[in-house]
Image (tube, rainbow, N blue to C red):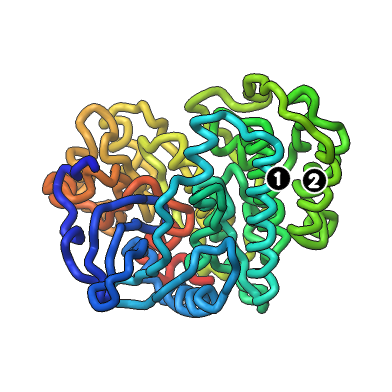
Amino acid sequence: MKEEPFGDPRVGSTLAGYRVGELIGRGGMGVVYRAEHLRLGRRAALKIVAPELAGDPAFRDRFAREARAAATLEHAHVVPVYDAGEADGELYLAMRLVEGGDLAAELEARGALDPARALELCGQMAGALDAAHAVGLIHRDVKPANVLLEDRQGYLSDFGLAFGPTSGETTRGDLVGTIHYAAPEQIQGRTLDGRADQYALAAVLHHCLTGRPPFPRDSDAAVLRAHLRDPPPRVSELRHGLPPTLDEVIARGLDKVPKRRFASCAALMGAVAEALEGFEELELEPPSVSPEGDRPGVVTLIDLPPIKATWDRRAQVLLAAVDAQTRALARVALAGRCEIREVEDDEESERVIAAAKEQSPDLLVLDWNAGGQGAAAIVAALRDDPALGEMKVLLTVEWTLAASPDVRAAGADATLEKPFSPLQLQVKLRRLLGAGVGHQ
């Protein structure tokens, strides 16, 4: 495994009775290590939640409830949860270690799956999801990377970090799921039920059959907009020979209106099985990007309805010299909450400094590699201006550089490691701006 540039102090340490081994995964919600329980000698996958999420009281409460529920979920195609809790100030989740790869890697290697294999794997996931929904759990992040593979069996992982229970508690605005598979109601921040997972499963099935997710676009903003507005493409046109009846089934699973979807994930896959009955293996056409997608690097404003929340006032947030993906995530995270202004990501440091001084925002979101001089020089120049004394600075930085002494000495109020989720950005915003932006 490639060694991190500044080392990983967790490797070789002990957490909650587990000896922490090599890093095997990283995402917006946290990091995953290979681990071994010292007393039982049992191997496990140990997920440690990102600090900015673990420090949020609402997140911690939901994590505790969902982890307990996930630990009681018994299904042949769900990765079992061994243990969860807090140790040494960190939230952790211990799960069965699945030694195979995942569906994302298989799709990357093969492009698409034989329809029978796609039906087999997605059928297994449907059973796992319906079992979870029966006990009030919603996964909220069904995607190929969360389908672990071992001996041709699929196992759905990350139930311990799935929020939004069917009991009525809402997590509006917390877009946890990967955007290529996220249901419209999740993007809009509405209350979720199991039909959001069904939408994601239909999107995964589409990817398995065609070699691409339903809405491949050239920017994250365009993907989100397509989930909200565009009809799903016909799989029979992307892969010649697939029956047109399958188009209707997948379109129903991907319906923008939850009540028009199937009654369960099993019902969706039953209809898929019926449409594919007697089907033989096909040649796959190369995927193409819709001409309606935005040009690379160009992010347009997402026309999202306001997310209902209680805010004491609208804070001013300036996105300065951040990349297109960060802009798209910020718009989702802050939609309806803050007034967002932007400085192009290719502007020089002087323009960034001038924009900050002119607009005097409550929060400046700045990329570490901003402008010609870099973020440290920009922050130093802004700190010298007494008129900006109340402005907070949030640095976005690649995780490989987060432990760098240069980043720590830059003078920012906080840093956010990339990749991150809209939820993580929301948590940072609340910490930096406090009651000025309210709480859900």
Q: Residue furthest right?
A: 245
Secondary element at image label 1: helix
Q: Earlier in the sequence, mark 2 or mark 1?
A: 1
Q: Quadrant of the C terminus?
A: bottom right
276 or 215: nearer the eye? Answer: 276
121 or 180: nearer the eye? Answer: 121
Percent coordinates x, y for residue 344 in the rendering? 41, 31
Above-or-below relation of 37 to 154: below
Task: Determine which quarter of the picture holds residue 323.
Answer: top left
255 or 107: nearer the eye? Answer: 107
Q: Quadrant of the N terminus?
A: top left
How many numbered marks does the figure carry? Answer: 2
* Residue 119, label in figure: 1
Above-or-below relation of 319 to 241: below
Above-or-below relation of 345 to 33: above
Is 250 left or right of 368, judged from the image as shown?
Answer: right
Percent coordinates x, y for residue 267 in the rendering? 81, 57
* Residue 272, label in figure: 2
Q: Residue at x 80, y 46 (%)?
A: 273
Contact between labelled residues 1 and 2, with CB atoms less than 8 Å apart: yes
Percent coordinates x, y for residue 53 in the rendering? 39, 65
Percent coordinates x, y for residue 89 in the rendering? 26, 75
Is 75 left or right of 39, judged from the image as shown?
Answer: right
Q: Residue at x 83, y 36 (%)?
A: 278
10 Å neighbourhood of mark 1: few (<14), some, or many (≥20)? many
Q: Residue at x 66, y 78 (%)?
A: 167
Secondary element at image label 2: helix
Q: Is residue 429 visible?
A: yes
Q: How many angstroms separate mark 2 from mark 1 (CA)?
A: 8 Å
- The kind of residue on which mark 1 rests is Leu
- The kind of residue on which mark 2 rests is Val
10 Å neighbourhood of mark 2: few (<14), some, or many (≥20)? many
